[in-house]
Amino acid sequence: MDVSPRLRAALYALGALTGLGVLAYGAHIAFWRGSEGLDNFFQDWVYCGATVGAGAMCLLRGIAIRKERLAWLVMGAGLMAWAGGDITWTVLLADDPSPPYPSLSDVLYLAFYPASYASLLLVARSRAEAWRSSLWLDGAIAALTVAAVIATLAFQPIVDATSGSPTQIAVNLAYPVGDLLLMGLVVTVFGLNAWRLDPVWLLLGGGLALSAVADGVYLVQTAQGTYVEGTLLDAAWPASAVLVALAAWTPTREIAVPDWVIVAVPVGGGVVAVQLLVYGHFEKVNAAAVSLAAWALLLALARMALAFLENQRTLSLTHTEARTDSLTGLRNRRSLLFDLEIHLAHADRARPRALLLFDLDGFKEYNDAFGHPAGDDLLVRLAARLAAAVDGRGEAYRLGGDEFCALVSPGRDGIDPILAACSAALHERGEGFEVTSSFGVVVLPEEADTPTLALQLADRRMYARKGERRMSAGRQSRDVLLRTLSERRPDLHLQLRDIGELALAVGRELHMGPEGLDEVARAAELHDVGKIAVPDAILDKPGALDPVEWSFMRRHPLIGERILLAAPALRPVARLVRSSHERWDGTGYPDGLSGDEIPLGARVVAVCDAFNAMTTDRPYRESVSEADAIEELRRCAGTQFDPMVVDAFARVISRERPAHGEVFR
């Protein structure tokens, strides 16, 4: 706890003095009794001083630290009232042969109980995360059980010995009732804290429980006429006050509690309550004990019912979550397989079902451009539209990623209207993007008689359609641009075709997927499309470029990206073209990317382009051999090029394009 050094020193001194006082008091009782003067000193002043010191420590905690201030100020006031009762008795009443009863000391003693209740609840409320109904029940069961046991063992002798005026009887009963409530509240708070063995709770609860137990033993012994002053029982009260004071300054530290403890408490409470009721059938037990035991048993039964309901809700929630997509709220793949089994069992040619499988086109580009949160929002919107499109005719599903599905009954109008509605639902266009979908349709049970076969067939048809659309849109755009390059610079057009073949081979060597291979091949062919905007005088200049000309040349990746972004099918390629002149060490252009920040496809294009440039005659230099070009690539690996890509490129050249028996290292 964060306190000033001066306060910490004072606190250590006060704590040490209080603790030593309690130890000295206990040692005196155990070993050094006999001297009247010394006995009176320890019994009167060391005893009272320990309680005053404990109360002062609690008050200091409340004054110095804002958190839980009220709780510890109240507890400190309660301990001071307790100490005030002892001091009042010692100074004013101890020597009176007939002291009044009840007296001012009794008022001060009894003031400790409400203070301890309030402080305990305030600390619990501050530290507990949530007081669930099950925790309330667990705490109440344990508290009632403990109270029933205490009432059975200690309450009746006290009641039997109580006599006098109504005020005296009320005060006599206030002590055991106060202790009974204190014990019950301590146990309840432990239950609300889920029985965690936090050192603060152990010290605070242990101290208050020790006080209540010592009071109970004292009251029983007094009722039976067996109490003797100056025994170790007397040391229990100042010791309990010191434990409470230590709790005020102890840091919180949670200790995990085994799950079986949470189960054992209500079960054990119920068992003890039953035993007490059985015992009360054969022996005389006071009505309070029987009532407390009965209530504990009833609450234990209520706790069992609550546990059953909680388990049912958990199972229901688990079942729902297992069959529901967490993002969109649609049913998931597990639910689809289950529903397919049912539909296949009931479908026939007269009442067919149709499985519609959809995969979004353009969603990856949307995610890359706008970020994953925006992509998730888009999926949620599209899912809601798909569910509305099939409402009343079937169910919508999300199988994962950007893949959706619908299981519908075609009806009289056939499948086409539903398919059109679903395709429209999975379409969204905005500034700089367009998301559509490819689909595969399977009629059940005519075309498939098992869920696995139905999904496989729908998947093949969907990807066949997706491939046709991609090849059509992407190839047409690519061919237009390559034709433009061919008309402007025929030599450049031929070089780009060659680079595309090299990039495709290197991509296969690096185990890139089908989409990645398609993108890297097209990026290699189109990476210099931005040179359309570069004057021929710069492209064909035989000497070195000046700074202005270099500035112009460095813009061509950005120009190429802008050109390609105009064709939605080429947007993934545009990203690679922009980064095709970046360097592994971060000194490239236009963005200064380095290492893995550069897309893998762009790193492949950079190596293939450099190799092609070195092995092709240029206006400003002659070509070099392929072996020398490979050697130069290896020399620049780790600075200009990705070493992994260079190694893969060298393997491809060695295997597929041996140059007159030359060996590449």
Image (spheres, helix red, strand yellow):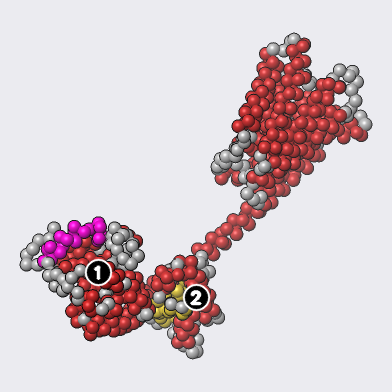
Depth check: 295 or 546 in front? 546
Residue sitting farthest toward the left: 660
Depth check: 520 or 93 in front? 520
Answer above or below: position of 15 versus 65.
above
Q: Main secondary structure of the magenta part?
A: helix
Percent x, y of residue 47: 74, 22
Which numbered circle lies on residue 546?
Answer: 1
- Residue neighbourhood size for the residue with mark 2, other residues' Cα within 10 Å, grouped as few (<14), some (14–19), many (≥20): many
Q: Quadrant of the C terminus?
A: bottom left
Percent x, y of residue 515: 32, 72
Percent x, y of residue 640: 25, 60
Direction from residue 357 to residue 539 in the image, left or right: left
Q: What residue appears at the point 19 percent right and 74 percent down from the top-left corner?
A: 541
Q: Amino acid at mark 1?
A: Asp
Which numbered circle lies on residue 246?
Answer: none
Q: What residue appears at the point 62 percent right and 34 percent down from the top-left corner?
A: 4
Q: Is residue 27 magenta?
A: no
Direction from residue 297 to residue 589 in the image, left or right: left
Q: Secondary structure at mark 1?
A: loop
- Choose mark 1 or mark 2, whichever is in front: 1
Q: What residue appears at the point 91 percent right and 29 percent down from the top-left corner?
A: 164
Depth check: 269 or 168 in front? 168
Which numbered circle lies on residue 382?
Answer: 2
Q: Amino acid at mark 2?
A: Leu
> Who comes first in sequence, dot 1 or dot 2?
2
Task: Using the rendered view, name the quadrant where residue 16 is placed.
Answer: top right
Answer above or below: position of 445 versus 70.
below
Direction from residue 342 to residue 99 in the image, left or right: right
Percent x, y of residue 637: 22, 58
Q: What residue appears at the point 51 percent right and 65 percent down from the top-left corner?
A: 326
Residue 183 visible, this angle = no
In the rendered structure, which segment of residues is drawn in magenta? 625-642
